[in-house]
Image (cartoon, helix red, strand yellow):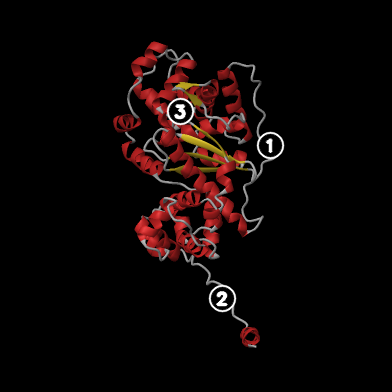
Amino acid sequence: MDLKLVGERIRRERERAGLSQRDLAARAHLSQPTLTRIENGARANVTLAELDRLAVALDIPVRLLTSGNPVRSRVRIAARADDAVTEEREEALRHTLEVLELDARLDKLGPAALQQRKPAGFLPVPDEGLPEERQARELAHRVRTALNLGIAPIADVDELIEQLTGVDTAVLKLPKATDGFTATDPERETTLIAVRACDVPERQRFSFAHELGHLLWNDGAQVHELNDGRTPGERRCDAFARHLLAPEEGIKTWLAAEKFALRTPVNERTAALLARHFRVSFMVVLIQLESMKLITERQKKELRGPTGVQLAQRYGWGPAYKQEQEAAEAVRAPRRILERAVEAYRQNMIGVRALAVLEGSSPEELEVRLREAGILPNPPNVKRANLSRLVARGMVKEQ
């Protein structure tokens, strides 16, 4: 057993659980200097009893400390980040892997316990010989047709993804350099799309739609941004997200309903109201309007600049936008995995700390909420000793 690797795993799991060395040492009945030496790989040996106490204190199986987690080594991840932010990317990887690792641990609930739904097959993608913009527009139209969305605004992009593909979605605390992740565990055939919790709700929605594009085109096993430049795959998924969230026919219909003359120059207010209607960024609307020949490139450059907050305050939806910002900043665990975790907690198979990490809340606050919802761990099964057998065994030893 490589004690240096064991120490690294203990440190990683301790940090994941939000514990200091002093906290973990106290829970595992070790001195802090002893734990420091174990984490640094400086102990000549570590007993299984010590590892067991550490695993209990961390609320994880002891094999994760002795052998590591196979999920970590086999998961394929595509991140929207570049090589210049390796440290941030690794931090984002850690948060994403935590969710998939917990899901793998929850398989002990049973093979039929809320496994990820496997769709019959994804939508066929357009001919890749077509121009990127046309591919993107056509695939967005196919998604809307498959879900009977017409040209209406999309309420929840994450729910759309789950309904269409069966994969899990999440909003996680990711570094600013990373907008979204697509992570796949090929052995368990499980995929998770995660985007960053942030105060720009329209950006979050766009990231979900962008990652859906990568999933449908099946190019999600590679990093899509190189040397601060955007690859063709990135540009195609950006275009897909634009057309999915703000379809051109929808824009035309909205303008007609507002009695907007197509020859009238689009002003800031009109573009802002369009962006609000489809819940996309102001820039996304400007790009669509330019693509539709409703504004020129020069007009687009003149109009660009205001943020979502500024436009909300100028045109009357400031308080509503503030509420949307607060919702976008909150961690949202995958509903399916969270349901599995709550059931595992009820069955006394995981502790409240593992559930709190998934929800992004403190164990104390979560325990109160669970109790108020009537969710309490089942009493552990106490195995009663066979006294007659123990007495007989003792008599044999004495002889």
Along the polypeptide, which appears first: circle 1 or circle 3? 3
Nearest to the eye among marks 2 and 1: give it: 2
The kind of residue tagged 2 is Val
**How would you rate the neighbour count of disc 3 (Cα within 10 Å): few for under 14, some for 14-19, many for 20 or more?**
few
Question: Residue 382: percent from the left, percent from the top?
Answer: 56, 75
Element marked by disc 2: loop
Report which quarter residue 233 is drawn in: top right
Disc number at residue 83? Answer: 3
Task: Look at 37% across and 62% down and name the residue there.
Answer: 31
Q: Are marks 2 and 1 in contact (CB under 8 Å)?
A: no
Q: Can residue 250 be seen by looking at this rendering?
A: no
Task: Look at 67% across and 41% down and name the residue there.
Answer: 119
The residue furthest right is 120
Element marked by disc 3: helix
Q: Closest to the observer: 250 or 2?
A: 2
Question: Residue 175: percent from the left, percent from the top?
Answer: 40, 37
Along the polypeptide, which appears first: circle 3 or circle 2? 3
Along the polypeptide, which appears first: circle 2 or circle 1? 1
Question: Residue 324: percent from the left, percent from the top?
Answer: 38, 40
- Gap in angstroms between the C-alphas marked 3 and 2: 52 Å
**How would you rate the neighbour count of disc 1 (Cα within 10 Å): few for under 14, some for 14-19, many for 20 or more?**
few
Nearest to the eye among marks 3 and 2: give it: 3
Element marked by disc 1: loop
Q: Is residue 80 above or below residue 360?
A: above
Pointer 2 residue: 382
**How would you rate the neighbour count of disc 2 (Cα within 10 Å): few for under 14, some for 14-19, many for 20 or more?**
few
Pointer 1 residue: 121
Direction from residue 122 to residue 287 in the image, left or right: left
- Gap in angstroms between the C-alphas marked 1 and 3: 33 Å
- Gap in angstroms between the C-alphas marked 2 and 1: 47 Å
Direction from residue 216 to residue 6 in the image, left or right: left
The kind of residue tagged 3 is Asp
